Amino acid sequence: MTRLPFLANRRLRITLLALMVLLTLVAAAVTHLANVERQSAARLDFSRSPWAIAATEVETLRYGQALELLAYGRRSPEVIEEARRRFDTTWSRVDILKTGPEGRPLLRLPGYPETLAAFDKTLQEQEGLIDRLEAATPEELHAAHKAIDAIIPRLRDAFLMMLTDANYNGLRTSAAHDLLEGRLSFLLTALGSLVVLLFLLLMSEIREARRLLRQSDAMVAVLRDREAELARLHAEATDAQQRAEDANRAKTVFLAHVSHELRTPLHSILGFSETINRESFGPIQPPRYAEYVQYIHQSAEHLSTLVEDLLSLSRIEAKEYTLNEARQDLGAPCRFAADLLRAKAEEAQVTLVLKEPEGPRRVIYAEQRAMRQSVLNLLNNAIKFTPKGGTVTLAWGLNDAGAPQISVTDTGIGISSDDQRVIFDPFFQVDNGLTRQHIGAGLGLPLVKSLMELHGGSVTVQSVPGQGSCFTLTLPKDRLI
Ligand code: ADP
């Protein structure tokens, strides 16, 4: 197919089509109007043809009579004027027969065109005579009358010929033919315009379809590229994940080994420093060493907690920590932690309050060690971050939704809202005066969070700096028995 560059422009194409439609409509309308006129004329002319020829014959007769009067000596100005008027009228009738629509159908009568030509010629020849009628000789006038007289029978013949069946029908056929021709030409014009229009539309649609096809091909190619790219990225990501999991597993194995290796000497340090501290085998000499031994014992305790926390966290992270769940009282971990840290609270001059809930005893299904560890970590922090004279409250029971929960509330230094967002990340410690005074590694809260999540529960914090904090452990409702 030839490519027309202007058809590539959509706007131009639309304008062109609109123009074509308009032109087609105008052409159809004009043809239709012309045909209506032509058809009505054809109908009219056919019915007026006999009258036209008869009227011409009558006029010619009158003209002939006027010439005759003049030839026989009646030369009054009125008669001359009358003859001239008759001449003009006759000639105008001949003109109508020659060129007028009424005369058109008659032209197909045999011999009629010749009659008309002869008539026309005769009138032309008499034009000079009519101009100088006053001076015309009787012979000239007789001759003119004779010439006109010769035409009349030929006109009558034509008239009679027209009235014969065959010719009358012929005329009718010719009128019908005209009608048909008009309608046909209208139909042909309309059809032609329609075909051109359809062809243009079709061409434009084909071009548009091809353009869309090209576009969709390009899109498919782009999608294929993306798909390949995605598959490559997916493979890379899977590979990286596998490597990370391997590394994590290696880390857990390493940590398990290291902590096991650390635990044995740590237990020795703890045991021996405890024995020395108690002065089981006699007083420490010199007494200053007693203080050092206490430091050794405290440091070893801290190291031991750190190693345990690290080990638990990495096990959870490597999904190698399996919960060892059992039925237990919801208040049990609270009492356990309070018993263990009461001395520490007294030392820090912080009041420790245990808020026993009213109503029946609540029993939960959870891991005892994890629950104890979590409450212990929270309580330990609460005592650590509450200045002298403050209060730490341990409470447990069911929340509004009926889920078991434990809360540790203190009147301590509080945590800013920015820090609240990150304290559950491993190794995070708020940089404040109190943190620096206490030993810690920033593993306590992440461990609580992981242990709670293992149970399907959560840990949340609410705190106002300078007023205190409240940490809440919440277990799922179905862990309540
Ligand atoms: P650490 O063992 O260092 O205390 P944690 O993970 O238990 O680590 O706590 C992280 C940090 O959160 C602490 O260093 C402390 O700044 C802040 N924090 C935890 N509990 C409290 C609390 N009750 N009041 C104020 N700050 C707290």
Image (cartoon, grey):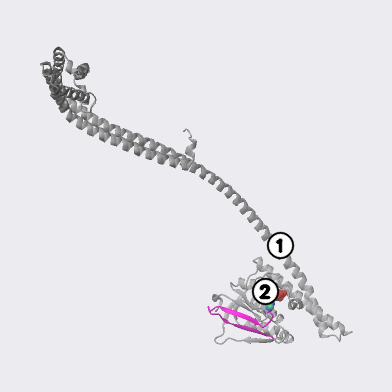
x and y percentages locating residue 393 in the rendered image:
64, 84
Q: For the residues marked 2 and 1, what is the alpha-carbon distance in whole angstroms?
A: 24 Å
Q: Is residue 262 left or right of residue 455?
A: right
x and y percentages locating residue 451 in the rendered image:
64, 73
Quadrant of the rendered image containing residue 157: top left
Q: Taking 365 as reference, is 123 above or below it?
A: above
Q: Is mark 2 within 8 Å of ligand 1?
A: yes
Image-quarter location of ligand 1: bottom right
Q: Is residue 228 left or right of residue 90?
A: right
Q: Residue furthest top?
A: 139
Name the one closer to the observer, 346 or 243: 346
Query: What's under tag 2, amino acid-wise?
Result: Leu
User: Pointer 1: residues within 10 angstroms few (<14), some, or many (20+)?
Assistant: few
Q: Main secondary structure of the magenta part?
A: strand
Marking on residue 250 = 1
x and y percentages locating residue 122 in the rendered image:
20, 16
- Screen quadrant of the C terminus: bottom right
* Residue 162 in sight in this render: no
> Mark 2–mark 1 contact, CB under 8 Å?
no
